[in-house]
Amino acid sequence: MKKIIISCFLLVVCLLTASAQSVYDFKVKNDEGNDVSLADYKGKLLLIVNTATRCGFTPQYKELEAMYEKFCVEGLEILDFPCNQFGQQAPGSIEEIHQFCTANFNIQFPQFDKIEVNGEGTHPLYAWLKNGEDIKWNFTKFLVSRDGKVLRRYEPRDKVCDIEADIQQELKR
């Protein structure tokens, strides 16, 4: 029975993902557990990031926050999705993660509930974003256009200053 339920769930995820035309077709849980439609971000340039608080890349939060403060008035939104799949580097509840991020990096951009980005439990948003290519580690980023299409994927080692240059170019369009 458990295998049937899992199979049905995976089928539903696949169908939702396959039918999605843009990022705006997805709903996610915010850091308070409430459903949020990504359609609420229509017209914004999005940088979607899977994060962790105990990772070698965690200091990127500082650069991401600086970039957010610089460009949010021009239409940039950074959407933060903590993920504990890589080395268990995002332990604790979303409340603890949020507290850590605000205390240490003063993040102002939206933070969402913890999700899975690979495997059977992959969130439909991430199944759509990664288009079959698994996430390798924390702080993989996706730049999504104002019309909800993936423009570019950035790996964790890509420099935030290079991402910023792409964001500036897209904000000018």
Image (cartoon, rainbow, N blue to C red):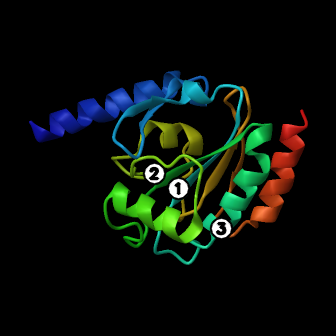
Provide the secondary structure element on which disc 3 rests: helix
Please give the label number shown on residue 117: 2
Please give the label number shown on residue 50: 1
Q: Is residue 114 visible?
A: yes
Mark closest to the chain's N terminus, 2 or 1:
1
Q: Is residue 36 above or below residue 46?
A: above
Looking at this rendering, what residue extends furthest in the left direction? Answer: 1
Residues at marks 3 and 1, CA–CA distance in whole angstroms? 15 Å
Q: Is residue 84 visible?
A: no
Q: Residue at position x 52%, y 54% from top? A: 134
Please give the label number shown on residue 88: none
Identify the image quadrant of residue 100: bottom left
Q: Kindly identify the amino acid type of the residue bearing the numbered disc 3.
A: Lys
Q: Kindly identify the amino acid type of the residue bearing the numbered disc 2.
A: Val
Q: Is residue 49 above or below residue 91?
A: above
Q: Nearer the viewer, residue 48 or 10?
A: 48
Asked if the residues shown at circle 2 and circle 1 are in contact, with their CB atoms under 8 angstroms apart, the answer is yes
Q: Residue at position x 81%, y 47% from top? A: 167
Residues at marks 2 and 1, CA–CA distance in whole angstroms? 8 Å
Q: Quadrant of the N terminus?
A: top left
Residue 85 at x, y percent in the picture: 39, 62
Q: Quadrant of the C terminus?
A: top right
Provide the secondary structure element on which disc 1 rests: strand
Q: Residue at position x 72%, y 60% from top? A: 66
User: Which residue is disc 3 drawn over?
Assistant: 62
Mark closest to the chain's N terminus, 2 or 3:
3
Q: Kindly identify the amino acid type of the residue bearing the numbered disc 1.
A: Asn
